[in-house]
């Protein structure tokens, strides 16, 4: 299991904490100031970005296009609101996939 994050979270302190927890760091590498990023780190960042973009897409869809903003009183109402947004997103995704399959 790994910890996924962007370059803002890469620090020695965080890396040590992740290692102590027995997890692997999937945090993006930072470019040294005034120098280009090494080729292996560029490839690693590109691979990590592919995974992160696939995972973050549903959140962006719900927040931006569906207007999900959680301003409720109580955890139960917030969970219900997020759950309904998840159901709506999954239904939209199903319609998209069915239409795409019908065309192919």
Image (cartoon, grey):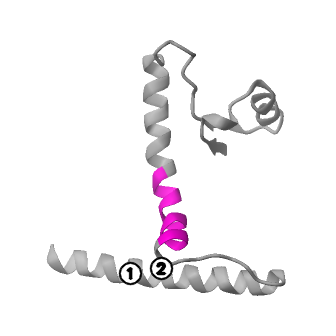
Q: Are circles 2 and 1 on residues that touch, CB within 8 Å?
A: yes
At x 43% / y 46%, what residue is drawn?
Answer: 50
Q: CA distance from mark 2 to mark 1?
A: 6 Å
Which residues lie in the magenta part?
53-64
Residue 81 locus on image (x, y percent): 66, 84
Residue at the top extreme of this rendering: 35
Query: Is residue 96 or residue 36 the one in the foreground?
Result: 36
Q: Nearer the viewer, residue 89 or 94?
A: 89
- Using the rendered image of the protein, determine whether residue 25 is visible from the camera's viewpoint: no
As helix, strand or loop, the secondary structure at mark 1 comes to helix
- Give the position of the C terminus as an image quadrant: bottom left
Decide: is 46 above or below 75.
Answer: above
Mark 2 is surrounded, within 10 Å at the Cα level, by few (under 14), some (14 to 19) or many (20 or more) other residues, namely few
| Mark drawn on residue 94 | 1
Identify the element where label 2 is drawn: helix
In-image side of 20 versus 70 (left or right): right
Relative vertical location of residue 96 with respect to residue 46 in this rendering, above or below: below
- Give the answer, above or below, for where 58 lies relative to 30: below
Residue 33 counted in the magenta span: no
Secondary structure that dominates the magenta span: helix
Residue position marked by numbered label 2 in the rendering: 90
| Rendered location of residue 91, percent (x, y) | 44, 84
Q: Residue at x 49, y 12 (%)?
A: 35
Percent position (x, y) of residue 3?
A: 67, 43
In percent of the image, x 24 and y 81: which residue is there? 99
Give the residue drawn at x 31%, y 76%: 97
**For residue 90, above or below residue 48:** below
């Amino acid at each position: 299991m790994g910890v996924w994050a962007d370059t803002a979270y890469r620090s020695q302190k965080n890396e040590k904490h992740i290692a102590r927890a027995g997890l692997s760091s999937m945090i993006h590498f930072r470019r040294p100031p005034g120098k280009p990023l090494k080729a292996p780190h560029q490839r690693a960042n590109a691979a990590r970005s592919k995974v992160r973009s696939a995972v973050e897409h549903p959140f962006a869809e719900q927040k931006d296009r569906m207007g999900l903003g959680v301003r409720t009183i109580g955890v139960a109402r917030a969970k219900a609101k997020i759950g309904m947004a998840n159901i709506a997103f999954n239904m939209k995704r199903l319609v998209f996939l069915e239409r795409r399959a019908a065309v192919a």
